[in-house]
Image (spheres, rainbow, N blue to C red):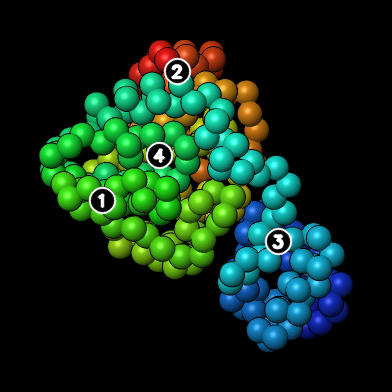
Amino acid sequence: MDDPGLRYSSAPTRREAILRRVELDGYVAAADLVSELGVSPNTVRRDLRRLAGDGLVRAVRGGAAAVDAGAVPFADRSAQAAEAKRAIAAAAVRHVEPGTAVALDSGTTTLEIARLLPAGAGLTVITHSLPAIAVLAPRADVTLIGVGGQYGRETRSFGGPETLAALEHLRVRTLFLAATALDAAGVYGATPYEAETKRRLVAAARRTVVVADARKFALDAPIRVCGWEAVERLVTDAPPPPGLPAVPVDVARP
């Protein structure tokens, strides 16, 4: 077998290989590149700095991610379909079982769920959303587990390797999962870190409830989080378009 280091001794060839990985997966860890390319960590760091400097990838802690040109700030998203999100949250909290652990994904709709969680229900709430943590922190009736990591200002949530590692050891009864976009194939996220965090949350939950306003069926996002087979229920504000796989749907009218 050829030495992998020989195949990637040329810097341009290495960088092309890195770009292919990022384009395919949306994210690549520096440690994986060291092994796959057969080069030193310093060489990988130099390649990633060069690619980031050229605007071809986005440097993130522990590796590189695809360039995200379309992120909408959290405050702007909060103002979009605000009444629909409150109605969705009110319908979603009916699926909260007293005395159980609940996970809240980051997002403006899940923030509304945090505000409406029933009092005195003996809930444990796990979330990486800073606004949700701020809402729930004063509540003595909620056991709050905040999942930290690298803070993302656009999403106002924590992400990265530390977040993923923490979620790996948690287990919840119900996850309320947000989405950047939806289609017949499933649920989509905007960035690699966001999508991978959502996948870890799905893996940690016994059941997943997707909460998303109907606009999400008309939007696009680059990274598929999961298919509908991983979802127990969708809570939205209008009937989904034809072609959605058979999943129970709650339609909450504003």
**Residue sitting at x 47%, y 29%:** 212
- For the residues labelled 3 and 4, the Cα–Cα distance comes to 27 Å
Task: Give the mark, 1 or 4, whose residue is nearer the N terminus.
Answer: 4
- For the residues labelled 2 and 3, the Cα–Cα distance comes to 35 Å
Give the amino acid at mark 4: Leu
Q: Nearer the viewer, residue 100 or 242?
A: 100
Mark 3 residue element: strand
**Residue sitting at x 73%, y 47%:** 69
**Residue 252 vertical placement versus 39 (above, below):** above
Position of residue 132 measured from the top left corner of the image (x, y, whole percent): 38, 46
Residue picked out by circle 1: 138
Visible in this render: residue 5?
no
- For the residues labelled 3 and 1, the Cα–Cα distance comes to 36 Å
Give the amino acid at mark 1: Pro
Residue picked out by circle 3: 58
Task: Give the mark, 2 or 4, whose residue is nearer the N terminus.
Answer: 4
- For the residues labelled 2 and 4, the Cα–Cα distance comes to 16 Å
Position of residue 146 measured from the top left corner of the image (x, y, whole percent): 34, 58
Mark 4 residue element: helix
Position of residue 42 measured from the top left corner of the image (x, y, whole percent): 70, 86
Local crowd at mark 2 within 10 Å, few (<14), some, or many (≥20)? many
Task: Give the mark, 3 or 1, whose residue is nearer the N terminus.
Answer: 3
Mark 2 residue element: loop
Residue picked out by circle 4: 111
Residue picked out by circle 2: 237
Q: Judge depth for marks 3 and 4 and give the one in front.
A: 4
Local crowd at mark 4 within 10 Å, few (<14), some, or many (≥20)? many
Q: Judge depth for marks 3 and 1 and give the one in front.
A: 1
- For the residues labelled 1 and 4, the Cα–Cα distance comes to 15 Å
- For the residues labelled 1 and 2, the Cα–Cα distance comes to 30 Å
Local crowd at mark 3 within 10 Å, few (<14), some, or many (≥20)? many
